[in-house]
Amino acid sequence: MTVNAYFSFLSSVISAFLYRCSFCLIHASGDFLWSPSTQGIILAAYFYGYVCTQVVGGRFAEVFGGKWVLGLSILIASFLTLGTPIAADIGVAAIVVVRVMMGMIHGVCMPTAFALFGHWAPVEEKSTLIALCVIGDNIGTIITMPLTGIVGIVWFFFWFFLAYNRPSDHPRISRIEIDYIQKGQIQFAEEQKLPVPWKKVLTSMPVWTVAIVSFCSTWGFITLLTKLPTYLEVVLHVPIQKNGLVNSLVYASICITLFVSSYLSDYLRSNKHMNSTKVRKGFEFFALVGPALCTGLIPAARCDRISVIALLTLAMAFLGFSGGGHVSIVADMAPHHSASIFGFVNTVGCAAGIISPMAAGFLLDNAHASVEQWSIVYYISSVFYLLGAIMFTIWGSAERQSWAQSSYSDKLLSVPYLQSEKLPSIANSDSEKKYGSIP
């Protein structure tokens, strides 16, 4: 990966980290004695707004570029994060409104990342870079901190001066870097601005398959994200001092497998020339069947701390295999409009973020410490995981869709001196004129 491409990727990872930190701040301990159902409503409020701006954010990034869309979303959300404690003091209604607004602002982040990676990610590294961005999302879950709002504001100023929509806009990038990034890419800078064929998108079985799989996967993930701290404290009686450590262990496991699976999927497709659909289906099978089995076995372990924590950790580790599965498949299916279509897919997926916390909250309201009630929550997640695995195995496809073809963009970039197996060393090309620099 080139230096400038690395910065673009790193900025996206940090932005994902910041918006997940903002999401998790609601778990901070304090004096608010909210019932499980009330907590479910507050947690779900974030997703009320989140699902509303996915498609709009992706389309804006495709047409106008992702720099300002992503940058301003993090900046505004950082101010809202700083105002969250005030809203909590005012009351439940106030914090619900703030979290709806925060969800709307954050809703543009991931689709915008897809638009940026469409320009900055080399083809053979795209799955890996997208997965690393998702890892930033999970790191935010592990390292939640009260200074998130301030960090987000500081991040924005770095983003403002150092980030660019596409390589050709960067004043300090070399021609070799640009050629490396664009080697094998379909030229779609202008095609991104073409109208999205929504009628064909909304009648595409592969698109709906990814959307439903995203819903099934998100159901289990959000249930765990929002209820794990309570489960550890109330059912397993894990001391509050160790609660955060166990949480971190669970989410660290998904970070590791996200990276490994995405890297392996890129390697198998680019170096071993394996069929993309078979690779995606293989990884997704483990990503959904694994958590289904693990969550289904948790009720059998009952209050055995070690067994339950091991199963939870293993479930998240399996879920991380989606990095080689459905997480980046939209970029394979429709590279020109991956941001908009990912926005639609993520909208459907994140609807689970609205329903699952409330469903779990109402199920647990009357028997908060009952293992039997918690068993129902885990069984529901297991069923959704299995449903997603079956659908993706039957109807999943990583092939470029017919409606995603472009009459004048199917020619790949031809870079003669990059046809060799080894690229010239950028470090040893000081004499190379910087693209966009002043002679």
Image: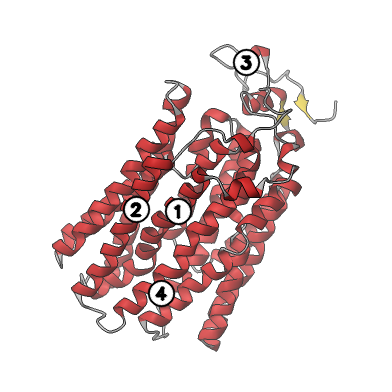
Q: Residues within 10 Å of mark 3 (few under 14, many from 20)?
A: some
Q: CA distance from mark 3 to mark 4?
A: 53 Å
Query: Which residue, given by chain and number where applicable, does mark 3 sit on?
Result: 418
N-terminal of the pair, mark 4 or mark 1, is 1
User: In front: 309, or 299?
Assistant: 299
Q: CA distance from mark 1 to mark 3?
A: 40 Å
The secondary element bearing badge 2 is classed as helix
Q: Can you tell which quarter of the image residue 171 is in? A: top right
Q: CA distance from mark 2 to mark 1?
A: 9 Å
Q: CA distance from mark 3 to mark 2?
A: 44 Å
Give the residue type that dot 1 points to: Ile
User: In front: 197, or 354?
Assistant: 197
Q: CA distance from mark 2 to mark 4?
A: 21 Å
N-terminal of the pair, mark 2 or mark 1, is 1
The secondary element bearing badge 3 is classed as helix
Q: Do the residues under discs 2 and 1 have CB atoms within 8 angstroms?
A: yes
